[in-house]
């Protein structure tokens, strides 16, 4: 099987900073065989573009992101495919790549000031100008009074301010790629809106390649350029974010239909029956077939590849493949 | 004609923080008709959860009046309060955190039945448990499972069964689906709605997801800093909010169709609300 290029359109001039090809991650329990966590993931992260990885919990989004930085938890290993930086350089775990996570309150150390914690992450070349760089970073993420923030302890800051402090810390190492893993899920909507704006703004100014991980399709539509939808460890549909207007994979269609709408109350939500299968209990054939309204015999037997169409969109579905039935 | 099941009049909740007094709920009034769903919308710190706890008489430092089925809750004696707690129950956001990890689902439900003296034998409890699990769409075999063996949606179903099994007619649901995945969220919302329709459950639904509110609620109140800033039928309030804060909430909610439309019209413009003025957050002195 030749992996299809799953990246959406790449604008002329947009260069891939980091590519993953056929990425696979296994979980190795203390006793027993390898369990597949993620399989066959192709990603191209381009400078100045936001790529979203979407799916429900247990689909492998965060594991994929951790694999990119070589930061997989114990017991897991990336044992398939390869990850390559465009400049050819080999980078140690976490280098060139920075993360912000869902819960900034848990990522920050409660006993050190914010300034202290950012200072710790400054690379050697900034050692001579620690104060200036600290102030610059805090201003970059929108703090009007950087000095006062630097002296604050995490508990003295609101959730939105904590997340901005985390962003400052992430930028300290001048990353090429920023992985934002559910960066606004713990925040109120008005604060979320501010952080999303800040992310869009930072990406433009710093020419970052952003990998946005979220389950919130609204956030994706606001921020992302390219979109990959994962289900049970594999990418099932990808393309430019506009694919959300008319997705082809039944899972993605189901996700959209499951969302309550602001304009029409009352009618029953369609939802998707069942739930994402846990590790080790993924079905044979197409992983989605037990929940799929279009499933037929083929789907139970053989797994569909992610196939790109002429329009740059790709879908892994027998029903939507050439000669399919939908 | 539909008499209100719950009437709340000038409710105030005050906390003491050191020497200071902080008013979390500042004179809120509303009523909920039997079989209706009232949505309470607001961000963290707006007083939603304090309000919920005060309504269920779980909070100290409460002033104002809460009437349930015509009775003043504050005036209830011990027996009356126990009866009230059977009829009015709460379902929380975190379905795992609100279940005892060491009790099988069946045992957890049986315990509730026993506390409220609703089952006089083990067999009777098991029978009732099985039937409540079916009501919330779970196979009775789940009685033998532990909470960690269940998915988030299944746990929330168990929580609903636990609230319903004592004969609840009024449920306060505090962000009941916000910890769930989208596809499961839809299943639970459908369940909440069908419980309202088939069993006439009256809901107080607390949350910040306006689309969920629009889907579930008949009426909505918008809370800000402990005060109601807007109220009305859900369709009106969420389509044309008049208070600036309600408008801000609506504008800030990410929305697939709106975002794609706005982005199509301008290069890389974020669909979300207008840019905020220079950041004015200040850390404390």
Image (cartoon, rainbow, N blue to C red):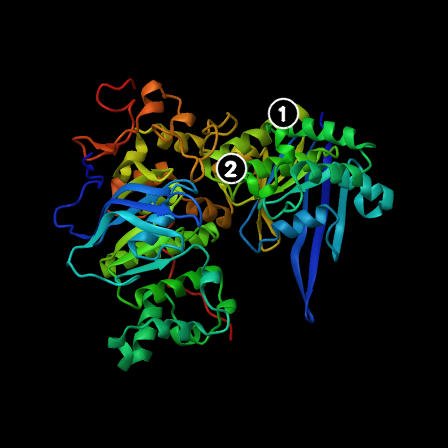
Q: Which mark is residue B97?
A: none
Q: Are marks 1 and 2 in contact (CB under 8 Å)?
A: no
Query: In the picture, residue A87 is in which quadrant?
Result: bottom left
Task: Give the residue at mark 1.
Answer: B197
**Residue A250 on image: x %, y %:** 35, 27
Q: Which mark is residue B212?
A: 2
In this rendering, the answer to whether A144 lies above or below A21 is below
In this rendering, the answer to whether B284 lies above or below A60 is below
Dot 1 lies on which element? helix
Q: Mark 1 Cα within 10 Å, few/some/many (few <14, many 20+)? A: few
Residue at 48%, 30% in the rendered image: A274
In this rendering, the answer to whether B180 lies above or below A256 is below
**Residue A72 on image: x %, y %:** 36, 54
**Residue B201 on image: x %, y %:** 67, 31
Name the image quarter holding the N terminus of chain B.
Answer: top right
Q: How far is disc 1 from disc 2 in space, using C-alphas? A: 17 Å
């Amino acid at each position: 099987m030749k992996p299809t290029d799953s990246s959406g359109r790449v604008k002329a001039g947009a260069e891939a900073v980091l590519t993953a090809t056929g990425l696979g991650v296994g979980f190795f329990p203390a006793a027993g065989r390898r369990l597949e966590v993620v399989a066959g993931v192709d990603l191209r992260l381009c400078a100045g573009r936001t790529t979203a990885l979407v799916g429900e919990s247990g689909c492998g989004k965060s594991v994929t992101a951790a694999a990119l930085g070589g930061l997989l938890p114990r017991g897991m290993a990336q044992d398939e495919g390869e990850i390559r930086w465009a400049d050819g350089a080999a980078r140690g775990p976490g280098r060139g790549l920075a993360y912000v996570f869902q819960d900034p309150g848990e990522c920050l150390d409660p006993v050190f000031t914010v300034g202290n914690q950012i200072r710790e992450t400054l690379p050697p070349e900034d050692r001579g100008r620690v104060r200036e760089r600290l102030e610059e970073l805090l201003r970059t993420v929108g703090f009007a009074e950087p000095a006062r923030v630097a002296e604050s302890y995490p508990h003295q800051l609101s959730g939105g301010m904590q997340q901005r402090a985390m962003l400052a810390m992430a930028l300290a190492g001048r990353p090429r790629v920023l992985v934002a893993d559910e960066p606004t899920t713990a925040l109120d909507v008005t604060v979320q809106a501010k952080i999303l704006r800040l992310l869009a703004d930072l990406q433009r100014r710093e020419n970052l390649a952003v990998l946005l991980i979220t389950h919130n399709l609204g956030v994706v539509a606001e921020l992302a350029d390219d979109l990959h939808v994962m289900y049970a460890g594999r990418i099932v549909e990808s393309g430019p974010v506009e694919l959300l207007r008319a997705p082809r994979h039944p899972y993605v269609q189901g996700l959209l239909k499951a969302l309550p709408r602001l304009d029409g109350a009352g009618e029953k939500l369609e939802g998707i029956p069942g739930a994402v299968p846990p590790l080790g209990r993924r079905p044979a054939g197409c992983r989605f077939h037990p929940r799929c309204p279009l499933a037929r015999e083929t789907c139970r037997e053989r797994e569909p590849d992610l196939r790109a169409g002429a329009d740059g969109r790709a879908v892994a579905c027998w029903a939507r493949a050439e000669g399919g039935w939908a | 004609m539909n008499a209100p099941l719950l009437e709340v009049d000038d409710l105030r909740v005050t906390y003491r923080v050191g020497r200071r007094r902080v008013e979390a709920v500042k004179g809120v009034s509303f009523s909920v008709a039997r079989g209706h769903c009232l949505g309470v919308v607001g961000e963290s710190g707006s007083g939603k959860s304090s309000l919920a706890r005060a309504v269920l008489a779980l909070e100290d430092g409460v002033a104002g009046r809460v009437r349930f089925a015509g009775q003043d809750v504050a005036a209830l004696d011990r027996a009356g309060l126990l009866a009230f707690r059977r009829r009015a129950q709460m379902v929380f956001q975190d379905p795992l955190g609100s279940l005892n990890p060491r009790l099988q689902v069946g045992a957890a439900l049986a315990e509730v039945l026993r506390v409220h003296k609703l089952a006089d034998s083990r067999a009777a409890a098991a029978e009732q448990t099985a039937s409540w699990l079916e009501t919330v769409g779970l196979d009775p075999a789940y009685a033998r499972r532990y909470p960690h063996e269940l998915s988030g949606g299944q746990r929330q179903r168990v929580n609903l069964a636990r609230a319903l099994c004592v004969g609840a007619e009024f449920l306060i649901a505090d962000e009941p689906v916000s910890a769930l995945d989208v596809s499961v969220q839809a299943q639970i919302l459908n369940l909440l709605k069908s419980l309202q329709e088939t069993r006439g459950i009256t809901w107080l639904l607390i949350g910040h997801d306006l689309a969920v509110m629009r889907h579930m609620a008949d009426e909505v109140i918008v809370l800000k800093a402990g005060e109601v800033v807007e109220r009305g039928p859900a369709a009106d309030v969420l389509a044309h909010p008049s208070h600036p804060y309600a408008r801000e909430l609506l504008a800030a909610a990410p929305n697939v169709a709106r975002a794609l439309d706005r982005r199509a019209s301008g290069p890389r413009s974020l669909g979300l609300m207008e840019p905020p003025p220079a950041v004015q957050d200040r850390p404390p002195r």
